[in-house]
Image (cartoon, rainbow, N blue to C red):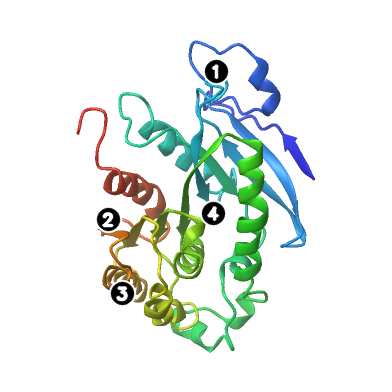
Amino acid sequence: MYKNSIFTLLGLNLLISVGTCFGQSPSKHPSFNIITQTIASKKLNETRVINISLPDDYQTNSKEKYPVIYLLDGGIEEDFVHVAGLVRYNTQPWINRFPKSIVVGIENTNRRRDFSYPVPNLDFLARMGFKKEQYPLYGGSANFISFLEHELQPYINQQYRTTEGKTIIGESFAGLMATEILLKHRKLFDTYIIISPSLWWGNEGLIASAPKDLSIANDQEIKVYIGASNKEEDLIMYNDAVALSETLKKNGGSHMKVSFDYLPDEIHSTIIHQAVYNAFKLLYPHTAYQK
């Protein structure tokens, strides 16, 4: 059901390896270990690739448990390497912004299908400049969420030493997915990093239903970061991000902490790296030298 493979990234001085490396003696300069595996998902009816980055002391600190950061758009050629690098940087002992963490990246097969919820029609696409034929498959979010909850999270918890801490990171359509989980399945994660989310899907259906979804009692402490790119590029997406932030602050209750971040120097295609960096700073403001 689960298979490993080895990648080599030349010029980056990264060792990308499988679990067999765990028997090796630790080097003076710890390697950046990335495990790539395939999972045969019954919920999605297809095989999916996941990439896993373990903390540099995972091999030697055999009793330590770690929180898990789940990255949508988490392929090697997507956002996995640079986001895992941000996690590595922020958890170095001279930074120590948050605990060392396991990063799990989920590679895409059809993100528009997986990250969108069902809608009665696609008439709203014209408002955003898209054509209906660009979306031959859509509305599969329930299956993807079931994959996360019933297959991927249990597998990671069984195979690796994990704590209860779970973060999800999603940008654009993946931000739509992260928002749906926050509103309708929020106990799956305790930290949500939502960047330039495509909340226009279904004519802002998630925003419209948010007050009702948030009215369901919840005593879990939740942290939410929402990042928005330059509003002159896309005013609809900016306004949607603001509306989500305001709705969460108004209806999220005392257990939900919401941080909104406007990045005017970034556009939709460039925002994710800076936004993830900003999110870590806003959600975890203290470092080793900033108490």
The residues bearing labels 3 and 4 have C-alpha atoms spaced at a distance of 23 Å
**Amino acid identity at mark 4:** Leu
In the image: residue 71, left or right of residue 6: left
- Sequence-wise, the earlier of marks 3 and 4 is 4
Q: Position of residue 138 (x, y in %)?
A: 63, 74
Please give the name of the residue rendered at 56% of the width and 81% of the height, measured from the top-left corner: 131
Q: Which mark is residue 243?
A: 3
**Amino acid identity at mark 3:** Ala
The residues bearing labels 1 and 2 have C-alpha atoms spaced at a distance of 42 Å
Residue assigned mark 1: 60
Closer to us: 196 or 249: 249
**Amino acid identity at mark 1:** Thr
Q: Position of residue 10 (x, y in %)?
A: 59, 27
Q: Position of residue 134 (x, y in %)?
A: 61, 75
SS at circle 1? loop
Please give the name of the residue rendered at 72% of the width and 62% of the height, measured from the top-left corner: 43
